[in-house]
Amino acid sequence: MNLTLKIWRQKNAGAKGNFATYRMEDVSPEMSFLEMLDALNKKLVEEDKEPVAFDHDCREGICGSCGMYINGHPHGPVPAVTTCLLSMRYFSDGDTLWVEPWRAKPFPVIKDLIVDRSAFDKIQIAGGFISINAGAAPESNSILAQKKNADSAFDSSICIGCGACVAACKNASAMLFVSAKISQFALLPQGRIEAKERVRAMVEKMDELGFGNCSNTGACEAECPKEIKLTNIARLNREYYKAY
Amino acid sequence: MGKLISKIPDGPLAEKWTRYKASVKLVNPANKKKIEIIVVGTGLSGAGAASALGELGYSVKNFCYQDSPRRAHSVAAQGGINAAKNYQNDGDSTFRLFYDMIKGGDYRAREANVYRAAEVSNQVIDHFTALGVPFARDYGGTLDTRSFGGVQVSRTFYAKGQTGQQCLLGCYSSLNRQIKKGNVKMFPRREMLDLVVIDGRARGIITRNLITGEIERHGAHAVVLATGGYGTIYYLSTLAVNSNASAAWKAHRKGAFFANPSFVQIHPTSVPQLNEFQSKLTLMSESLRNDGRIWVPKTKGDKRPANDIPEEERDYYLERRYPAFGNLVPRDVASRAAKERCDAGYGVGESGLAVNLDFRDAINKQGKKAIENKYGNLFDMYKTITGIDSYDEPMRIYPAGHYTMGGLWVDYELMTTIPGLYAIGESNFSDHGANRLGASSLMQAAGDGYFILPNTISNYLADQISVAKIATDKPEFEEAEKAAKERINKLMSIKGKHTASSFHKRLGKIMWDYVGMSRNETGLKKALELVRELKDEFWKDLNISGSAADLNMELEKAGRVADYFDLAQLLITDALDRKESCGAHFREEYQTPDGEALRNDDEFAYVAAWEYAGEGKPHILHKEELKFEYVEMKVRSYK
């Protein structure tokens, strides 16, 4: 298939960006979206032009490196898929695709489609852990956890930290991201001990970094490639009220 | 240098580690703060080590090339992590785990190291559980386990098919706690370009800031490499596409011996290549072999849809050839068996380079729900990639480059042949011999990082307490920085026609065709020649657009591919030298009449540790003889 790509190009954080237009011919439906961009970059480098910069690594949807809007949707129009696993079979000959970096104040653009997501690390550093040193752990089976709680903790913990939730939110809220980590620990007995300090510290950091408030539109849940549920946000709120 | 001193402690196998810890030199808490340690890499071993060293009070600097330490490729491990807990009452023990690893590695690993890895495995599980890793649990609230290839006990702890992600996020959380406390300083988006050696000791690294292109110097009392494996030397592999061997290779050029480079694991169950533009192969966890049955049609070239082929016309070749272990034979055996069937013309799919992994019987017996609970995310991922629903028809799978057992040579203390330089996790060679068993990678990486290195490194650092903070204005830093800049300039100024990836792809094809699952002398020699030619072409015809003083992913790739040409030659040389078949290293000249690997213990029961002798000069081989005192060397049989 033949496609028209409108890709956001921006030299660096300080520069002014704009959309550049590229024609892609003979795109195979078996390519992934990033492989299609690889093909574009190959062409650009062979013409001695700068390739489009984008973050990517595992290319199997688990590292959370990749992420871009494709026609306005974080990770593209297909639900529950990261950009790296988005197959070109979902697009049709003649399509025009608008490709942009995450647009959110706490995620400044570094170059082209790459943004700085270190704000997510800062929130985790504030409290996303259980305080235990190597060597101090008790025997695993001395900590019993209900299977249904452990399973729910797992469902929350699979967040890959890609930032799609923030990108999807009109307020650039990080509530889904923060609530996933809060929920994982809140649901496990190991995590209860520091529950109050954790939720206070992470929410405070989230606010300080300029993420917006949650107004319950649910865009984050709709666009999350890992289908993290909105119920996590409800749990975060409950944990937060309990902490004061 | 030249002599390999493995520093294995005296005493009975089961007491070596305890005795070692009881006699190791310590650094007192007040001195620890003054000692700086660099850790490169943030996977299970790197983030584990950085956390544990921070907890002890050392000043740690941790580096990764990704934007966040949470993205290290440990994240992609799927099936599980082993421990000798014996929660199933099925006869497991530290010794049995040790024995399984030694046998699985085809008697090419060091007994003392492997025993210790098995010994700390239980601590690793306890630590991860305490960190809040949501392992699968039984209804009574205890941890659940499952079986994995190459063993007859159930010792694999898991979090669905995302065990690596969950363990890595556990490591990331403990790392974050130390960053908050100020014990660890994190340097993301940095690539290590060289190791700095002063008076024979590792004293720092040179890095490139991947955002600004700036070349930076970092000094430390000791350097720990936790930089993973070199599976992407095959271009297409199950690894993250940016995974590379450059840090290890740079250390090798500075004097760290490289051990058993030809021991590369080809994983049997990956999604087959679908198109020529493909950038990676996605793994389907080995745990699927617990319930999936592998088969091909009994008739050559049978192109009927899998579900139309009746039971009596299916060849469950693993169950046929290996009745005792069936579908759960080790990875090397399963991969070779798949290749054998496909080469003989029985492969399925358009290319004929695939076999069926069928869940029909398991679904009939256990119900779709049970299979969904165990493997739901893997089935989803398979469907996302291929569009095929494997609840209704078999998955198609084929082997892919996966894990490298070879790596930097280390002694019992995990120190390389450069004093003060350590290698942990996949970047060292020590625990998996010629073949790694499933779910023992996470186990070894976390064990190295959290529990072994933090104990052994004090033996070295105890003598370093009077050494002042390493100043980075020394001539050795100057020279290393200059060399790194010159190399970048050289790469940037070739201005040829082709991209680094296009060369990488061609290198991968040579490696896969001649140095993959099956090797022979003629092919290896040809590969050596082809790699040399391709390397010459690379240095004449590469193009990198953009600038080196900026974010430039083409430059990053080019540097890694350039190192791969050199590592590839060493890998081939090692494969040529090892005139036997063992584990993943299968030399066609050395096989039994029924096509099984034929080891030669009289001549090859050694670790091949290669010393770099200078640009263009042949490597020097050092042999570390392997002695087996607790395990009898037997023909590895899974029949």
Image (spheres, coloured by chain):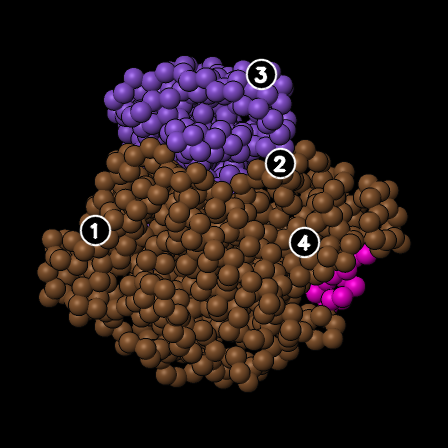
Chain colours: A purple, B brown
Q: Amino acid at mark 1?
A: Glu
SS class, disc 3: loop
Please, which chain is the residue tagged with disc 4 on? Answer: B
Q: Nearer the viewer, mark 4 or mark 1?
A: 1
SS class, disc 1: helix
Give the quadrant of residue B623: bottom left
Residue span colored magenta: B314-327
Can residue B362 be seen in the rendering of this structure?
A: no
Q: Residue at x 57, y 45 (%)?
A: B281
**Residue B323 painted magenta:** yes
Residue B98 image offset from top left, x and y in percent = 52, 71
Q: Nearer the viewer, mark 1 or mark 2?
A: 1
Mark 1, residue position: B481
Please, which chain is the residue tagged with disc 1 on? Answer: B
Mark 4, residue position: B289
Residue B467 image offset from top left, x and y in percent = 12, 64
Q: Nearer the viewer, mark 2 or mark 4?
A: 2
SS class, disc 4: helix
In the rendered image, which quarter contains the C terminus of chain B?
bottom right
Mark 2, residue position: B385
Q: Is residue B387 above or below residue B162?
A: above
Q: Earlier in the sequence, mark 4 or mark 1?
A: 4
Seen in the image, is B309 located left or right of residue B379?
right
Q: Amino acid at mark 4?
A: Arg
Q: Residues within 10 Å of mark 2 (few under 14, many from 20)?
A: some
The CA distance from mark 1 to mark 3 is 48 Å
Viewer-nearest residue: A144 or B13: B13
Q: Residue at x 78, y 45 (%)?
A: B360
**Residue B167 painted magenta:** no
Mark 3, residue position: A95
Asked if badge 1 and badge 2 are on a common chain, one would say yes
